[in-house]
Image (cartoon, rainbow, N blue to C red):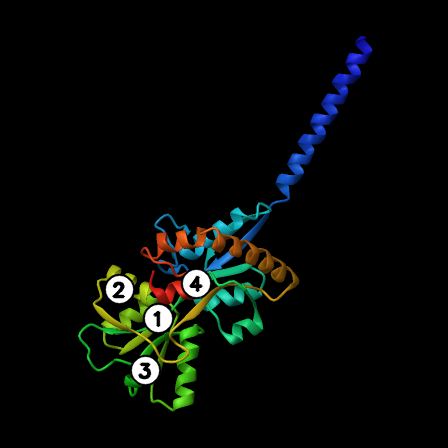
Amino acid sequence: MKTKWFFMVVALFLTGAALFASGKKESSAVTTIRVGTEGAMPPYNYVTEQGEAAGYDIAVVKAIVALLPEYQVEFVPTAWDGIFVALEGGEFDLLASYLGWRKEREEKYYLSTVPYLWSGYSLVFKEGRTDIRSLKDLEGKKVASGVGTASTTLLEEYIKQTGANIEIVYTDGNIANALTEIDTDRVDATINSTITTQLTANTLGYRIDSLPLTEEGWSVISIHLLFPKTEKGKTLRDQFDGALRQLLSNGKLRELSREYLFGRDYTTREALEAGV
């Protein structure tokens, strides 16, 4: 009888050890995803006083990863002029930084096929100016615009197509710097997201006016997560797409938009245009 009990105890011990080893292996299988973000476009992405990445872009990625237990996430705030180089160099697994759709980006990277945000551009200038009401009014003027941003590409294309005499003053993409250029009269205007621009201007104490751009190609843009064009990047993009569809269908994405973007739903084009 004692021998029987001895073998039962040994069996239970071995079973427990196997389960412990299995649990340990499962825990170590969690992969860390490094996410690059500019951290300079509130409320989409910014860095808190504690040095942590925050904002709508960040909250969306966290919600996605919550549906993908095989991953954990690390956010790395990075200057705009180095963020794509870092992605291409393998430092990041994806970018979450208010990235609008562009043909050049789609050719070079994997974009999430599901946009997680829809937005529009505004023409921004110093309060009190009455001479700027449309793109045509930028003739003979200076416009601050971030190197490599979607709005810069659109502006460059507009100048090329129309022959407009508009001088682009290239910046690092940080809207605060563009607004400082406007406030000090070094440039006449900039083109950017309405929400980010007004929020940053309020923080800096700058008084600005803005008008939504309604010209073709400017009015509405889709915002995407961006992945390297590798086998790993495609796999991760497909997994994130599945999670994004779930967040759209269960209302979580809409909830995050209203939480971070002043009570408005910008998660679909229909919601953006309806102003809900």
Check disc 1 and report the residue beneath it: 192
Q: Is residue 153 left or right of residue 49?
A: right
Mark 1 lies on a secondary structure that is strand
Structural distance between the alpha carbons of marks 1 and 2: 12 Å
Place of residue 99 in the rendered image (x, y in percent of width and height, measured from the top left): 46, 66
The residue that disc 4 covers is 268
In front of the other: label 4 or label 2? 4
Q: Residues within 10 Å of mark 4 (few under 14, many from 20)?
A: some
* Mark 4 vs mark 1, CA separation in Å: 19 Å
Residue 127: quadrant of the picture: bottom left
Closer to the camera, 139 or 273?
273
Q: Residue at x 68, y 35 (%)?
A: 22
Is tag 3's residue or tag 2's residue first in the polypeptide sequence? 3
The residue mark sitting in front, 4 or 1, is: 4
Residue 54 visible in the current orientation: no
Placement of 167 over or under 76, stated as above or below: below
- The label nearer to you, 1 versus 2, is 1
The quarter in which the N terminus is drawn is top right
Q: Dot 4 lies on which element?
A: loop
Along the polypeptide, which appears first: circle 1 or circle 2?
1
Q: Is residue 9 left or right of residue 147?
A: right
Of the numbered discs in the image, which one, if any, rests on residue 135? Answer: 3
Which mark, by number, is residue 201? 2
Q: Nearer the viewer, residue 54 or 234?
A: 234
**86 lies above or below 249:** below
Query: Which label's residue is closer to the chain start, 3 or 4?
Result: 3
